[in-house]
C-alpha cells in the first residue's frame, strides 16, 4: 500500500522512537509518598532531623515546596533536597518541642501534576 | 487562590480535549492511508474522490488547531497554577521541565500540522504534503511517551512507555475514524461523492476498527495488571475505578461498532442495507458520545496515582459496596451553625477533627437530590405509557433541584456562608464544579421542559443529551480538595459510577431522538419494541439509578 520510501521512513522513525525512549533521562509522573523515615525514626525533641520521604516516582525539586505545620496551623517552609536514590526527598526539620506537627508537601511531578498531601507526626517527650 | 481553583479544573478538562484533538490528527492520517488510500497509486476506482479527501483534511486541520490552542493554554495555565500554588514563579525551572518541553514540542508540531493541512486544503492530492503530515505524526505520537504514568516507574519503564503510546495510538485510530465517519455522513447531503463513498467507508473501517480494538486490549490489559495489581486495586482506588469505567464505556462503544460492522457486511453481501443509512449514522453519533467519555476518563487517569502505589490507603471491595447499598435516605439536616462550628476542626492540618455535622450535611444534600431525581424519573417512565399528559412536565424537577443545590452544595460560601460568591467560585476547584453542576441542572430543566412540551422546539431537544454528556464528564473528572485517599476515593466511587451512567443517559436520549426519524419497519428490534423508545427508556432508567445512588449516599467521616 505504501511506497518504499514511506516504509523506510516509518521503520527509521520507529527505531528512533524506541532508542529515544530507551536512552532518555529519567523523568517522573504523579508522585505520592509510599513511605517516610518518620515511621522508623521518629523525630526526637529539640534535635534537628533529616526526614526522608520516599515517593513512588520522582518530583521536580525546584518546583516543589514542603512546609512544617505546627499547632494552630502555622506554616514554616523547610529546606528540601534530592536523596541518594531516585524518588527520595530529604526534608530538614528544625529542632522541635514535643507536640503534634505535620509536613505539608506540594510536589510537582514531571508530567505536570501537582500532588498536595499532609503527613502528620508527633514529637514525644524524652 | 482565585486562579488556583480555576486553573486546576481547566487543567484536567484540557487534558481530555487534548486527547480528542490528538486522536483527530492521528486518526485522520490513518484514515487517509487505509480508508482513502492516499498513498496507494494502484487504488484506481477504489481510491477516494477529492471531496471525501477534503473532509478528512478539514478534520485534520480542526484537530491541529484545537491541539495547538489547548496545548498553548495548558502551558500557560500550568504556569499560572505554579505561581498560585508556590507563591512565586521559578520560570527557569518550569521551562526546563520535561512537561514543558514535551508540551512545547507538541505545540510546534500542531502548528506544523496546521500549515500542512492548509496546503492540503488547496490541493488534497498533494503527495508531498501528505508525506510531511505522516512524518510529523511520528514525533507527535512519540512525545506522548513523556506524559504518561510509565515514565515515572522505576521498573519496566521503557516497556510501559512504549505500550502506553501504542495504546493511545490505537484509541486515536478508533476515535479518529469514528469522527471521520460522522463528518462524512453529515456532508453527504451537500456532496454526492460523500454519499456514494459512505458504504465503502463503513466496510473498510470495520476491519481497521477491529484491529484498533485488539491493539487496545492487548496493550491495555498488561498496563492494567502492572498499575492495578489486585481486585481491591481495581475497585478500591480512583485509578482502578476509572479503568473499570473505561472498560464499561468501551463495551458500549463496541456494541455500536458491532452494529455498524454488521450493517457494512450486509451491504457488502447483498449490495444494500436499510440500517446502513437509517441507523448506522445515529449509532456512530452515540458511539462518539461514549468515546468522548472514554477519552476524558483516560485524561483523568493520568492525574491519579496507580493503585499499586497506594496499597495502604486502598478501600476494600466491601467498603465500596457499602457506599452503594440501599438504606433510608437522610431527610433531616444539621443546622448551618452546627455545620460551621465543626469546619475549623475539619480543615485543620495539625489538630484535624472530623466533622459529623459536615458529613450529615453532605448526606442530606445528596439524599434529597436523589429523592428529587428518583421522583422525576418515575414520572418520566410513566410518560412512556402515553396515557398521562402531565407527565411530560417531569423536567421541572431539575429546576427545583438546581435551586436546592445553589443553597446547599457549599455551605461555607455565599449565600449561606461567609465566603463571597466570586471568591469561592474561582478560588476553589470543587466549588467551581458544584456551581457548574447547579447551572447545568437549571439549564437542563428549562430546556428539556420546553423540548418535551413544545412540538416546535426541534433543536432544543438535543441540548439534554449534550448537557447530560457534559455533566457526565464533569462527574468523571470531579475531584475533592482533601487528599485523604481512602475516604476521598469512597466519595469518588459514587461520582464515577454516576458519571458513567450520565453518559448512558446522554447516548440513550440522543438515540431516541435520532431514531425517531428512522422508518417504522427498520426501527423495530427482534422483540418487537421500537429501538428508539428502548434507548430512551434505558436513558431514563440510567437516570433513575443515579437518583438511587444519590438517595442512598453516605459520606465517610474524614
Image (cartoon, rainbow, N blue to C red):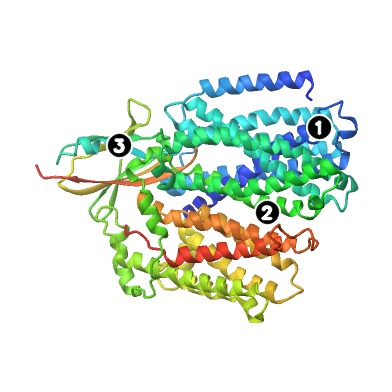
Determine the CA span between mark 3 and mark 1.
54 Å
Q: Position of residue A60 (x, y in %)?
A: 43, 35
Task: Give a yes or no on whether discs 1 and 2 share a subunit.
Answer: yes
Q: Residue at x 49, y 63 (%)?
A: B434
Q: Visible in this render: residue B144? A: no
Q: Which numbered disc covers residue B37?
A: 1
The one nearer the camera, B136 or B39, is: B39
For label 1, the SS is loop
Locate residue B358: give its quadrant: bottom left
What whole-number distance in Å separates the C-alpha atoms at marks 3 and 2? 45 Å
Cα separation, mark 1 vs mark 2, equals 27 Å
Identify the residue position indicated by label 2 in the image.
B286
Q: Is residue B157 among the parts visible in the rendering?
A: yes
Chain of the residue under label 3: A
Count of marks, rendered view: 3
At horizontal 54% and vertical 63% (from top left) the residue drawn is B436
Q: Mark 3 — residue?
A: A35
Q: In which quarter of the image is residue B278?
A: bottom right
Amino acid at each position: 500500500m505504501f511506497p518504499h520510501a514511506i516504509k523506510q521512513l516509518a521503520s527509521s522513525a520507529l527505531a528512533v522512537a524506541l532508542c529515544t525512549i530507551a536512552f532518555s533521562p529519567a523523568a517522573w509522573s504523579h508522585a505520592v509518598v509510599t513511605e517516610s523515615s518518620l515511621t522508623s525514626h521518629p523525630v526526637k525533641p529539640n534535635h534537628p532531623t533529616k526526614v526522608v520521604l520516599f515517593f513512588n516516582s520522582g518530583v521536580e525539586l525546584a518546583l516543589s515546596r514542603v512546609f512544617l505545620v505546627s499547632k494552630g496551623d502555622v506554616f514554616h517552609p523547610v529546606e528540601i533536597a534530592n536523596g541518594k536514590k531516585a524518588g527520595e526527598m530529604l526534608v530538614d526539620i528544625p529542632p522541635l518541642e514535643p507536640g503534634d506537627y505535620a509536613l505539608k508537601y506540594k510536589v510537582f511531578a514531571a508530567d505536570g501534576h501537582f500532588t498536595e498531601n499532609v503527613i502528620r507526626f508527633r514529637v514525644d517527650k524524652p | 487562590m482565585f486562579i488556583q481553583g480555576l486553573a486546576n479544573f481547566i487543567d484536567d478538562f484540557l487534558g481530555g480535549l487534548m486527547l480528542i484533538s490528538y486522536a483527530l490528527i492521528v486518526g485522520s492520517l490513518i484514515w487517509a492511508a487505509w480508508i482513502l488510500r492516499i498513498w496507494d497509486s494502484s487504488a484506481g476506482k477504489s481510491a477516494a474522490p477529492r471531496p471525501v479527501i477534503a473532509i478528512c483534511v478539514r478534520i485534520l486541520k480542526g484537530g491541529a488547531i484545537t491541539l495547538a490552542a489547548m496545548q498553548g493554554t495548558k502551558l500557560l495555565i500550568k504556569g499560572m497554577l505554579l505561581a498560585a500554588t508556590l507563591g512565586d514563579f521559578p520560570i527557569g525551572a518550569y521551562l526546563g521541565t520535561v512537561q514543558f518541553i514535551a508540551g512545547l514540542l507538541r505545540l510546534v508540531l500542531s502548528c506544523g500540522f496546521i500549515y500542512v493541512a492548509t496546503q492540503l486544503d488547496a490541493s488534497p492530492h498533494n503527495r508531498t504534503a501528505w508525506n510531511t503530515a505522516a512524518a510529523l505524526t511520528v514525533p507527535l505520537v512519540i512525545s506522548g511517551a513523556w506524559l504518561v504514568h510509565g515514565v515515572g516507574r522505576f521498573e519496566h519503564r521503557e516497556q510501559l512507555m512504549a505500550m502506553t503510546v501504542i495504546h493511545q495510538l490505537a484509541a486515536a485510530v478508533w476515535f479518529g475514524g469514528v469522527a471521520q465517519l460522522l463528518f462524512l455522513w453529515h456532508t453527504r447531503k451537500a456532496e454526492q461523492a460523500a454519499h456514494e463513498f459512505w458504504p465503502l467507508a463503513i466496510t473498510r473501517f470495520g476491519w481497521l476498527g477491529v484491529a484498533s480494538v485488539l491493539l487496545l486490549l492487548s496493550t491495555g490489559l498488561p498496563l492494567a495488571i502492572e498499575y492495578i495489581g489486585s481486585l481491591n486495586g481495581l475497585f478500591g482506588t480512583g485509578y482502578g475505578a476509572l479503568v473499570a469505567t473505561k472498560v464499561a464505556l468501551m463495551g458500549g462503544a463496541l456494541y455500536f461498532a458491532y452494529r455498524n460492522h454488521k450493517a457494512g457486511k450486509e451491504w457488502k453481501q447483498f449490495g444494500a442495507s436499510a440500517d446502513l443509512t437509517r441507523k448506522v449514522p445515529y449509532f456512530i453519533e452515540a458511539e462518539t458520545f461514549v468515546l468522548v467519555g472514554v477519552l476524558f476518563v483516560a485524561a483523568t487517569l493520568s492525574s491519579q496515582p496507580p493503585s499499586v502505589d497506594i496499597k495502604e490507603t486502598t478501600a476494600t471491595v466491601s467498603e465500596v459496596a457499602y457506599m452503594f447499598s440501599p438504606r433510608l435516605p437522610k431527610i433531616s439536616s444539621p443546622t448551618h451553625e452546627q455545620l460551621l462550628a465543626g469546619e475549623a476542626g475539619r480543615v485543620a492540618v495539625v489538630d484535624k477533627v472530623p466533622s459529623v455535622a459536615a458529613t450529615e450535611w453532605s448526606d442530606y444534600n445528596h439524599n434529597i437530590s436523589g429523592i428529587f431525581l428518583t421522583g422525576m424519573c418515575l414520572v418520566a417512565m410513566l410518560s412512556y405509557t402515553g396515557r398521562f399528559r402531565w407527565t411530560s412536565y417531569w423536567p421541572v424537577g431539575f429546576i427545583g433541584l438546581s435551586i436546592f443545590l445553589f443553597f446547599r452544595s457549599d455551605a461555607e460560601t455565599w449565600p449561606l456562608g461567609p465566603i463571597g460568591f466570586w471568591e469561592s467560585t474561582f478560588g476553589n476547584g470543587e466549588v467551581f464544579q458544584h456551581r457548574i453542576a447547579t447551572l447545568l441542572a437549571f439549564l437542563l430543566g428549562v430546556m428539556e421542559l420546553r423540548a418535551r412540551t413544545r412540538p416546535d422546539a426541534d433543536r432544543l431537544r438535543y441540548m439534554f443529551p449534550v448537557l447530560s454528556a457534559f455533566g457526565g464528564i464533569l462527574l468523571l473528572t470531579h475531584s475533592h480538595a482533601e487528599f485523604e485517599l481512602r475516604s476521598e476515593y469512597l466519595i469518588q466511587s459514587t461520582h464515577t459510577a454516576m458519571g458513567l451512567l450520565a453518559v448512558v443517559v446522554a447516548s440513550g436520549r440522543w438515540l431516541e431522538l435520532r431514531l425517531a426519524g428512522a422508518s417504522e419497519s427498520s426501527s423495530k428490534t427482534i422483540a418487537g419494541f421500537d429501538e428508539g423508545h428502548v434507548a430512551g427508556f434505558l436513558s431514563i432508567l440510567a437516570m433513575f439509578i443515579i437518583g438511587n445512588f444519590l438517595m442512598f449516599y453516605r459520606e465517610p467521616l474524614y
